Image (cartoon, helix red, strand yellow):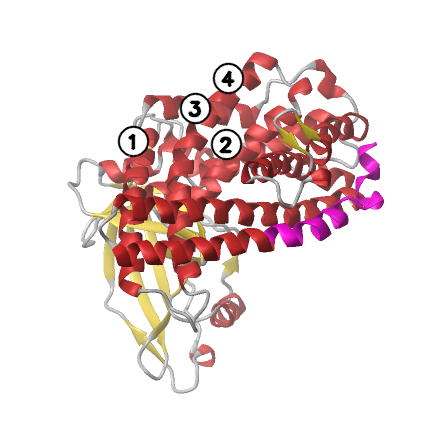
Amino acid sequence: MVEEERKYQVGPDFTLPDLSGCLPPGGSLAGLPAVTLTATYYDTADLRLARAGVSLRHRRGDAEPWTVKLPAGPVGVRHEISRTGRRSTPPAELVELVTVFSRGAALEPAAVVRTERHAYEIRDPDDRVLAEIADDAVSVLSGRRVVRRFREIEVERKGGDRDLLDAVAAALTGAGARAGGFTPKHVRALGPAAAGEPELVAPADPPAEPTAAQVVTAAVRRSVGRLLAHDPLVRLRAPVGDDDTAVHQMRVGCRRLRSDLRTFGPLLRTDWARSLRDELKWLADVLGAARDAEVLRARLRRTAAADPACPLDPAAVDRIDAALVARQDRAAAAVAEALRSARYLALVETLVAAARAPELTAAAGGPAAEVLPRLVAKPWRGLAAGRADGPGAGSLDPLAPDTDWHAVRINGKKARYAVDAVAPLVGGGAAKLARSLSRVQNLLGEHQDAVVAAQAWLDVAREHPADHELAVTAGRLYERERNAVRSARAAFPDAWRRATKKGRTRWLR
């Protein structure tokens, strides 16, 4: 569940304004019974969760009293996951969800907050709840003693849109409420220590003329942040958009970071970078099996529906999907086992340390504009001219075996990630090259996905030799995938010509 809230600080004498002007035509404002909520927040001794914008709480009286809240992008938007469990012990599933924030440190009660809540619902003419406004009088407890009091207004989006929240905000601030940063109750209760810098350092915009070290550090921090931010969602097997998954994003984080460590290798301590790349490969391989199953399941339905005038046997398609579900479940179980392992916990520690301070060499102290283009030129040449393991993109034969196209795809990823890492610094041609390489990589990715899928459909059919309808369906799916391969190959030369325009590559020389 994703929760979107806005908070407003108010004094003890604040009076909730008339909100009738915020209601939709025919809507209503309904008061709810007053409630008292007592929540105990758990954290590490150094408040790692609070500093990361994360909370784990037990709240008396809730049907599912244990709740974890995780940042979900924009300020005030959070993932909320609730579970049942004994009052004295946080559920193991929720403790695992905060692994990348706690990094295995013990979680103990850190704050107890009692809230006297008077809430109101804005409803539409069909009695659908659009937003909830909670007027909260908060007491911070130490045992039975109140050590601090404050009052705040929370406005939570339900079935309404953001325009409604804006209208409520205008009414509240007009009455004297103070809008500001989104500070959860437990962070206010815990004081300044809970508002300190998080353990995972976020990337900062480099200065106008950065050193290579500053650019490399920002790139490492971006990739580490992407990887670790999706850990809890991978554990939940949750989507991150209409057509994306957490497994995919976490795997991309692994790949980008491995690419950064390779591209910027001369600027990094060799043994440190090699060890980290090895561990990232282990994690990427585990995630890769789960991601491959996701891609195949999504592709199966898309390929089966590609020609509505010539439909495939739906029952046979369902049987293929059932085989993929079993494969996906096995892969997901392997991911869950890996994320629970001591090896992964050690990797998380290493990643947090890497984001804080990558182990750089003296060469990284030079101007980025002089140092980095030479390093990025190497993977670019590997893509354009080829390597020992395959041809270059410029000489790729349309009739070459699939393995040659796959080798170019691998080199394309290396080049694209390297260009992406420095494009914000170089701008101009580098930014254009990054966009062109994205198009090239999308075509090569579609090519490889179709190749893998075509083989997968035949493999499923071979596993069921007596199922003739399935064999026919798998064969038809195979032909559609090979047609997708031919289409990607036909479109590739134009995409490559665009990527190799002189204005886009001149900076590499």
Please identify, in this view, whether the residue under mark 1 or under mark 2 is nearer the observer. 1
- In the image as oriented, which residue stretches furthest toward the left? 86
**Which numbered disc flags the more N-terminal residue, 3 or 1?**
1
Q: Residues within 10 Å of mark 2 (few under 14, many from 20)?
A: many
What's under tag 3, amino acid-wise? Leu
- Who is closer to the viewer here, 151 or 166? 166
**Which numbered disc flags the more N-terminal residue, 1 or 4?**
4
**Which numbered disc flags the more N-terminal residue, 4 or 2?**
2
Q: Are circles 1 and 2 on residues that touch, CB within 8 Å? A: no
Q: Residues within 10 Å of mark 3 (few under 14, many from 20)?
A: some
Return the x and y of residue 45 as percentages of the image width and height.
35, 27
What's under tag 1, amino acid-wise? Glu
Q: What segment is highlighted magenta in the picture?
A: 488-509
Q: CA distance from mark 1 to mark 2?
A: 24 Å
Q: Is residue 79 left or right of residue 112?
A: right
**Which numbered disc flags the more N-terminal residue, 1 or 2?**
2
Return the x and y of residue 500 as percentages of the image width and height.
78, 44
- In the image as oriented, which residue stretches furthest toward the top? 271
